[in-house]
């Protein structure tokens, strides 16, 4: 029953020994300190049929096959299962095997499979208090009267009787004989498995098996050549099975490992864990108690179709703690026994269902309202010394619940405000309030103080009970028409919009100065929008056409750099060392790996035209070198830190009609935004020669050999899964037919920059 919704539920049975080899011990094991000789009864006349037991190291079928430690009895289902066993020291009658569990478990039955004769006498004990006290499950003996004279050997009369059983102590069989113990005798019908004496029979924290007497066959069978006949007598067990489950009182169908449990629990998938995964609003290792705040009914184990789930306390939302009180439960006729603790919101009672003394329930609110009770305590400043509030509303008596007797100049139900034209409610004033005393610099002319608070009617931007100070964000009381002047703190350079009331000085961020915090301190500067610049000289050249399916990575040629030096009379229109020249049909790759934080960025490319004319008979327009051109990608994209991006810029080949033309693109820089993580490519097609489309600051006609379109790709360093394309439409001006003598043209690329997205005007 995985959901435990239909009544009681119980975890599946398993072998409690699985995963607990470190918790299984024996009082005697052969060969623990040194190899020990032992013999087999069937080979009495042959000296070579004696063997050695060496249990100084754990069993290994290849290197330690003579090890007979107690952990060998745990079921493994291995092929060599009958080749390993536990064996005690020779000739010792009193030997015990003990299993110590980490919590309370439910015990079903025990099966012991012996390699030698079964014991002539033994008993099985259990403990429910981690070994402090022990109780006997059952006695086993070949001769019960001789081995356990005070124990009845007859059949059990009730399920809890402790008797001596002689069925499992015969000398036959000599090997693979079993001893079986069931916690509950199936011959008895159990009406209620959760009564205390039944629970005591089937639960345990420790199990102990005490062997008290060996079977011996007499000296005549031992042979004369053996100096020690006891070498033939010892206890040996092939397998020990302890069936049980975690004990959950019918409130769980699954169990989990105990906290901080160590050892081989992590290596045994069949281990029976000890912490119940509780249902029915219960908790604890064995689901033995109700959850906090589920104490309205007594805890009970689930039985059959009755889940006996713990009930949530009803505290009307005014307490989160409660306890169960049996007397209260019985007085209610078994309806409710939960008593709320530490009621809040001025409530009290078993269910926090009424208001405390000196409080009254708001007639417009239910008791479960977050604030149902109103205090009737009077304001001491405005109440007469002997005055107490009226406890209830009575029209006949003229009383109102919560109303207090006020001083002469005080009014209100709680005597908490002054009458009109009075202010300054005070307990030392026998009349309660005094006349107004407003600050003339901040008060409106002919105004009076507020009768409830004593505050004056202030001019704009002033505040205070007497209008004696400026509002937050203003300064200079009395220096302006409106009483105070605004601070006007720079939103980007100040911590907030608050300033000094005396001189208006704003609270500047580090390294920012001036009254309004709008200037950098000496030695510092404000970052421009295009602070993240990527020089074309540092980009990688790309060859081939632009489509994503044809991109060649790692096959690029060297980058051609055009260096520039500042000269007198010429404006510096570039950054870095200069520009990068790119042939038509090729492109550049800019690497971006220093994104500071995730946000939208605009991608901007900065470039200059350069036209190399070998022979020019007639040209409509020639744009000289040095003209500044800037193109901004129309759609911003998002970049995230911790990811490397690539921005690829391609320029297509000229048209097939320009057979004698050879074009180059000289890239200065690009401003870009990227999306992270990019699992797809951004493809932009568009003529940067058209200022109306690309945002260029140039104008005029263009030579026919200039590239007709530019393709811009933005990808991340992860090249897998490229899919999806975003197109930037192409647009260009048709060239003049008189430009046929121009044999080479180029664009000079300066840099690529990342700019926070905004409405940028060219």
Image (cartoon, helix red, strand yellow):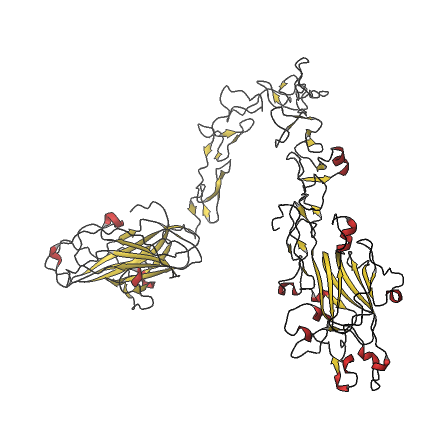
Given residues 522 and 713, the one toward you in this image is 713
Give the image quarter of residue 132. bottom right
Q: Position of residue 49 (x, y in %)?
A: 75, 84
Left or right, residue 140 beside residue 645:
right
Given residues 60 and 125, the one toward you in this image is 125
Q: Position of residue 105 (x, y in %)?
A: 72, 56
Given residues 172 and 50, the one toward you in this image is 172
Residue at horizontal 84 percent and vertical 86 percent from the top: 224
Residue at horizontal 78 percent and vertical 63 percent from the top: 208
Left or right, residue 603 beside residue 153:
left
Left or right, residue 328 beside residue 367:
right
Q: Is residue 263 above or below residue 451?
A: below
Give the image quarter of residue 354. top right
Q: Is residue 715 above or below residue 425?
A: below
Q: How many marks?
A: 0
* Residue 470 in view here: yes
Q: Is residue 505 above or below residue 22?
A: above
Q: Position of residue 146 (x, y in %)?
A: 89, 67
Left or right, residue 589 beside residue 26:
left
* Residue 564 in view here: no
Q: Residue furthest top?
A: 396
Q: Is residue 294 above or below residue 712?
A: above
Given residues 13 and 632, the one toward you in this image is 13
Q: Residue furthest left?
A: 617
Residue at horizontal 86 percent and vertical 80 percent from the top: 219
Q: Position of residue 398 (x, y in %)?
A: 66, 14
Give the image quarter of residue 115. bottom right
């Amino acid at each position: 029953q995985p959901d435990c919704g239909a009544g009681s539920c119980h975890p599946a049975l398993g072998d409690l020994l699985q995963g607990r080899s470190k918790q299984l011990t024996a009082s005697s094991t052969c060969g623990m300190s040194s190899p020990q000789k032992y013999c087999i009864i069937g080979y009495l006349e042959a000296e070579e049929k004696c063997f050695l037991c060496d249990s100084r190291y754990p069993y290994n079928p290849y290197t330690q096959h003579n090890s007979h430690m107690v952990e060998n009895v745990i079921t493994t289902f291995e092929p060599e299962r009958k080749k390993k066993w536990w064996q005690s020291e020779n000739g010792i009658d009193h030997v015990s095997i003990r299993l110590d569990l980490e919590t309370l478990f439910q015990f079903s039955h025990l099966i012991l499979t012996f390699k030698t004769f079964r014991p002539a006498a033994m008993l099985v004990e259990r403990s429910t208090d981690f070994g402090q006290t022990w109780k006997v499950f059952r006695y086993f003996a070949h001769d019960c009267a001789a081995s356990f004279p005070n124990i009845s050997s007859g059949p059990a009369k009730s399920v809890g009787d402790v008797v001596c059983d002689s069925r499992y102590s015969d000398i036959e069989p000599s090997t693979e004989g079993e001893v079986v113990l069931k916690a509950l005798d199936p011959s008895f019908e159990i009406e209620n498995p959760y009564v205390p004496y039944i629970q005591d029979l089937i639960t345990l924290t420790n199990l102990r098996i005490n062997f008290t007497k060996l079977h011996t066959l007499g000296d005549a069978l031992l042979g004369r050549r053996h100096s020690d006949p006891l070498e033939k007598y010892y206890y040996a067990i092939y397998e020990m099975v302890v069936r049980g489950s975690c004990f959950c009182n019918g409130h769980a169908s699954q169990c989990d490992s105990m906290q901080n449990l160590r050892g081989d629990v992590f290596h045994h998938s069949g281990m029976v864990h000890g912490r119940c995964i509780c249902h029915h609003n219960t908790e604890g290792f064995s689901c033995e108690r109700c959850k906090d705040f589920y104490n309205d009914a007594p805890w009970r184990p689930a039985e059959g179709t009755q889940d006996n789930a713990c009930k949530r306390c009803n505290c009307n939302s005014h307490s989160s703690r409660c306890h169960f009180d049996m007397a209260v439960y019985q007085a209610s006729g078994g309806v409710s026994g939960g008593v709320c603790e530490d009621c809040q919101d001025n409530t009290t009672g078993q269910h926090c269902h009424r208001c405390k003394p000196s409080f009254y329930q708001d007639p417009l609110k239910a008791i479960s309202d977050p604030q149902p009770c109103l205090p009737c305590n009077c304001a001491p400043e405005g109440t007469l010394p002997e005055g107490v509030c009226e406890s209830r509303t009575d029209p006949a008596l003229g009383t109102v619940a919560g109303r207090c007797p006020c001083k002469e100049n005080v009014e209100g139900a709680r005597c908490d405000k002054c009458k009109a034209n009075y202010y300054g409610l005070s307990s030392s004033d026998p009349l309660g309030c005094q006349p107004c005393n407003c600050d003339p610099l901040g008060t409106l002319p002919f105004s009076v103080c507020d009768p409830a608070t004593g505050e004056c009617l202030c001019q704009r931007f002033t505040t205070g009970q007497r209008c004696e100070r400026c509002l937050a964000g203003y300064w200079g009381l009395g220096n302006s028409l409106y009483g105070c002047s605004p601070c006007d703190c720079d939103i980007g350079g100040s911590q907030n919009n608050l300033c000094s009331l005396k001189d208006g000085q704003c609270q500047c961020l580090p390294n920012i100065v001036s009254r309004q915090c709008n200037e950098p301190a000496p030695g510092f500067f404000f970052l421009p929008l295009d602070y993240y610049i990527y020089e074309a000289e540092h980009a990688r050249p790309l060859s081939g056409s632009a489509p994503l399916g044809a991109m060649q990575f790692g096959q690029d040629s060297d980058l051609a750099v055009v260096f520039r030096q500042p000269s007198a009379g010429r404006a510096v229109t570039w950054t870095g060392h200069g520009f990068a020249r790119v042939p038509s049909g090729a492109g550049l790759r800019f690497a971006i790996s220093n994104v500071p934080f995730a946000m939208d960025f605009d991608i901007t490319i900065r470039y200059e035209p350069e036209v190399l004319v070998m022979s020019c008979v007639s040209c409509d327009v020639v744009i000289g070198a040095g003209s500044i051109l800037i193109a901004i990608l129309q759609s911003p994209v998002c970049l995230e830190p911790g990811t490397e991006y690539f921005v690829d810029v391609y320029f297509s080949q000229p048209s097939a009609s320009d057979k004698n033309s050879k074009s180059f693109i000289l890239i200065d820089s690009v401003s870009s935004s990227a999306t992270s993580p990019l699992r797809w490519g951004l493809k932009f097609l568009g003529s940067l020669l058209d200022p109306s489309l690309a945002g260029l600051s140039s104008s005029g006609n263009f030579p026919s050999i200039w590239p007709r379109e530019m393709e811009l790709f933005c990808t991340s360093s992860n090249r897998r899964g490229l899919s999806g394309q975003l197109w930037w439409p192409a647009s260009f001006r048709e060239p003049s037919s008189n430009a046929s003598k121009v044999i080479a043209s180029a664009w000079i690329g300066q840099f690529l920059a990342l700019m926070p997205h905004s409405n940028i005007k060219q």
